[in-house]
Structures are given as C-alpha cells and as structure tokens.
Image: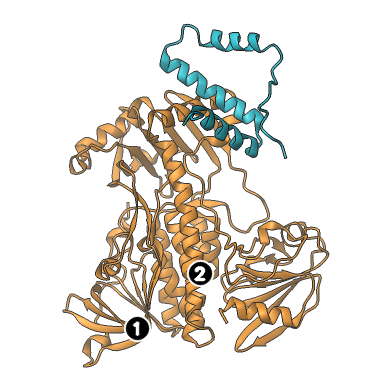
Amino acid sequence: MSRIFETPLYPYRRSKDQDTVRAVRHPVVVVGAGPVGLALAIDLTTQGVPVVVLDDNDKVSFGSRAICFAKRTLEIMDRLGCADSMVERGVQWSLGKVYFDERQVFEFNLLAEGGHKRPAFINLQQYYLEHELVARLRALAEEGMAIDLRGNNKVTAVRRTADGVQLTVDTPQGPYEIEADWLAACDGASSPVRRALGLDFVGRVFEDNFLIADIVMEGGAESPVERRFWFDPPFNRGQSALLHKQPDNVWRVDLQLGWNIDKAEESKPERVIPRLKAFLGEDARFELEWVSIYTFQCRRMEKFKHDRVIFAGDSAHQVSPFGARGANSGIQDADNLAWKLALVLQGKAPESLLDSYDLERRQAADENILHSSRSTDFITPKSETSRLFRDAVLDLSEHFPATRPMVNSGRLSLPSVYDGSPLNGPDCEGMPSRTRPGAPACDAPVSGGWLLDRLGGRFQLLTIECDAPEHLEIEGIGVERLAMSATGQEELRTRWLGSAESAVYLLRPDQHVVGRWRSFDREAVRSAVLRAVGR
Amino acid sequence: MAELIVNPNIPDPDDFYAELLAAHEGRAKAESDAFNARLILLLANHVGDRTVLTQALEAAARSRNVDE
C-alpha cells in the first residue's frame, strides 16, 4: 500500500526572500496548501497574478479526510485543468441503502440528470485531489508562471498595515519576513492566521464524537459500490454508522461514539479493531490505514474579509461532515475569490469588489451550515421528541415512500445561487430559474463537447440564437462572445432558453450568471459588466 | 391558496374519536407516543400543502396557550 500522504511532496527549499535585507513584497500570499489554497493559487496564476503559497508542512493531507467531491467542484477543477484524473480515479456510485436497527428500511438510486460532463459526485481521498493540484501548480511553474509553493514555511506572526500585511515565517533555517498586498488565509479550521489576528469564530458545537477509519481488507476484498447508512444498529447501539467506498479498495467506516468518551483511549487499535469487527464480522481481516476521532462544529466568522486579509474554506466556516460541504464549499470560495482579487490587483475593479466575496460566500456558508445542521439533528436527535419523530420517519419509510424524503443522512452539496447579490444584473421573463442571475452555469452538451468547457476565466457573452459583437472592451474589461445554436440541443434549450426564442447571457469568470436578455443591447451589457466588477 | 380547515370536517366525529382512542388502547406511553408521531407524519404528508401545515402548527401551538 503506497502511503502518498507520508511522502514529502514539496520539501523545504531556501527562497531568495530569506536572503534580502528588506522584506520582499508580493501581490498575494496564500497561507495553506490544502485544496482551497492550492485551487486559489492556481486560479490566480492562470489569471496573471503572481502567487506565493506558504505551508507549514511539506506533504498532502494526512489520511483520506474529505472523500466526496460534488459536480460543481469537478467543474471548477476542470477550469483549473485538474478534473480528468480525479474522475478517472474516483469512485462513482448511485445506490444508497438506509438501515434502522436490524432492518434495511429502504434503498435509493440517485439517478443523476443526464447531459452533464461531470457526474453528480465522486468519492476520492483528499490527498489525491491535493496531489493533482500540486502537480498542476508545478506544471504552471515550469511554464514560467510566477507560482511559488514553499513547504515547511510556518507563519508565526501576522501584522496588518494600512495597505497590506506583514508576515513572519519560520523555516528549518530560521525565520524571515515577507509582505503581501493581500493575504489569503486558507489555513484550515484551526487557522493560525485567524488566531494571530484574534478574530472571532463562533457557532454551535455538536457534542458528539465520531470515529473514522480507513481500512483495507485482507485479500483485497472490494467494498460494495454504494453508500450504507445505519441508524441505531445492533453493533453500535443508539448511534449511527456509515460505510463508503474509496479508490484503492479502501473502505471508509464512520462510527458515532457519543460525547463522554476518552478520545485517546478510543483511538487505540485495541479499541478500534473490536468495534470494526462488531460491524464487519468477527472473521474480517483488515489493515487500518488511518484512524481519527473528531468532534465537529457548525460555525463561521462574522466577516470573511478583514482589511487585506481574506479567509477562505475551513478557516472561515466549518460544517458537520454530513453532506460533503467542507472541501466542496471551500473550493467554491476560491472560485469566487480568484477573479475578483485578480481584477482588483490589475486595477480594473475597486477594492470594494471584494466585499461581494464576503457577502456571497457568507450567504453560501449559512446555507451549508443550515443543511448540515439539519442532517446532524436527524442523525443525532437532541431531545426525546426529536428522537421520537426521527424513529417514526424511519419506521414508516420501511413501508411507505411518503416519509423517505425526510430521511436525512446528509444532503449532497449543491452550489449556492448568489440570489440578491449586488453584482447581479437584470433577469428576463420566461427563462429557466436554474440559470437565473447569480446561478452557476448549468452544463449542457453542445456541438463538439460541453458548454462548461467553453466558459470561465473571463467575462463572456453566451448568445443563443442571437447576434452580438465577437468582442467587447468595457473600460478595460474584455468580454468575449460564445455563440450557440439551440437547434437539436434539447438540454441547452431547456436549461438556458426555457420558453424564450433567443437569449444573451453575461457570465462572470467563475461561470456564474450576471444577467440575461432576449437580445443584445450594448448599453445594458455595458452597465451589467460595470456592476459585476463593482463599479 | 388553501386554508387550514378549522370548522367541523369529519363526518360522524364521535365514531372517529372512538377509533382514535381504540388505536391507543393497551399501548404503553412510549408506544402511544411513537404511534402519534407516525400518525402526524402520515397525515402531514397527506395534506402536503406547506401553508396549511404551517397554519396547523401555529393553530396547535395557540390552542395550548389560549389562556395566557
């Protein structure tokens, strides 16, 4: 078994910033080389912004951690050039089984909607995602782009100045100073940057512990390609259990342990192995790849932007793991932030554009916290009455479809629609709700490939059955046209035209819709572009 | 838009009431509570209308506190 998470991937190398008398100033310093920091750095680089990434480590994440990546994440990864190998390696599943006590109460098939390049989600260990991102970052650096990933560079002090940030960074060869116009703190739930600045992080602690174990069965037995969830099973009375498949024959087992336990004691193999055998059978032979006990919280910072310091991912918000909303939402933070930061640094948008990052992603975080708190309340009822209704839902679900939609063992992460965002332009009657202003672009097959492969990274005008200039230059912001015909493209028609005969969509560099019209109007597009860049 | 029916709507109410009590007969408190929860969920699904369900929740809360 190769343990890619134990191998140094970006070992410490001395940077020339360590040999200067005055601290070197960079446009953007990203702290944290997890999925969010790496995605942000790659996005910024490809949009022409030099980036330095500091990580206190030199390896991918330890253990599998996040294992479920949703379609929107894969679409963002596609834009960053990283999705193909993720999807190739990842496990696609659609069958889910729900058990209550000793019985299977029902099973469901998540028949994903057709006509999308990417599946609804894949299971993949977080370290593979990070590995892919590091490889992409290296490839960009080799092409001569200014992207510098510094391993074993630990931020020990953060000082805010009027127009930037000063950092003290510790390395195996001692500390050095560095400055940044903007600091992106993608340094995880325990964010040293957030702590160094003494910023709040309030929310709800769920008084519960969960044991996660990644195991490999002896003889290479494959785990079933499905998700199994148990409420109150005989092998873990009063608690829940989850079994999920990962690549490389790794089984992910998640067992709820309750609140009053000794975490150190419960992490020991002599305690873990009997628990797993009670679950998998006394005869089961397996190797433990990774074990972790976690307690989770649902919380977010009051604001994600503090002067020139911007928080993204777990450093800004934390959710329960049910519904795969941690890494997925963090990657959407990066997707939202990169183009805005690039335009601000290039002098094409006012600094206030970044307030919309704060607003749009706080709204998304609240949505994620709401959904994941609801799942948690269903899985671990907090009162006698709550348990009574939960059990009633499960009992009825065995016999009637009526209550099955209420069974909540995690609702899959869907991207947020930035309804009401100040960046949004006009909507147009008769067009579909799913592509309204603020929504992420919805994929569809188009002649020669997929719509989403042709969107992103710049402002674009998507015209369907409609004429418009090939290129517009609006006060320094370039807008390119993508012309499409709906003839013979039923998905494109249903998802983008609705009852309209023609459409013009203005899309942001993160593929979200700004506004839409029936036909091209230069003045209307111009004012929507300026609004979308905060001018 | 549908409204919660708060006027009599069940033909032969005495008979329904007797049937409701009979369904609980011989059940321990915990069992009766579970039965009620299942009944509420089935009836709520039958009603379906979110506005009516909210009105029913509000009406049920109000009648408890009518004297407060």
Quadrant in the picture for residue A488: bottom right
Q: Which chain is orange?
A: A
Give residue A228's position: percent from left, percent from top.
46, 36
Give residue A470's position: percent from left, percent from top.
73, 83
Give residue B5's position: percent from left, percent from top.
68, 28
Q: Which residue is drawn at 56% across and 79% down?
A: A534
- A339 to the left or right of A133: right
Q: What residue type is labelled 1?
A: Gly
Instruction: Identify the mark nearer the N-term, 1 or 2.
Output: 1
- A227 to the left or right of A287: right
State which mark lies toward you, 1 or 2: 1
Q: Residue at x 42, y 11 (%)?
A: B28
Residue A479's place in the image compared with A39, above or below, is below
SS category of the residue bearing label 1: strand
Task: Tell me whether marks 1 and 2 sit on the same chain.
Answer: yes
Quadrant in the picture for residue A526: bottom right
Q: The cyan chain is which one?
A: B
Q: Which chain carries label 1?
A: A
Locate the C terminus of chain A by quadrant. Answer: bottom right
Q: In this view, which residue lies farthest toward the front?
A: B67
Q: What residue is shown with label 1?
A: A164
Q: Residue at x 50, y 7 (%)?
A: B25
> Can I make out residue A136 in this image?
no
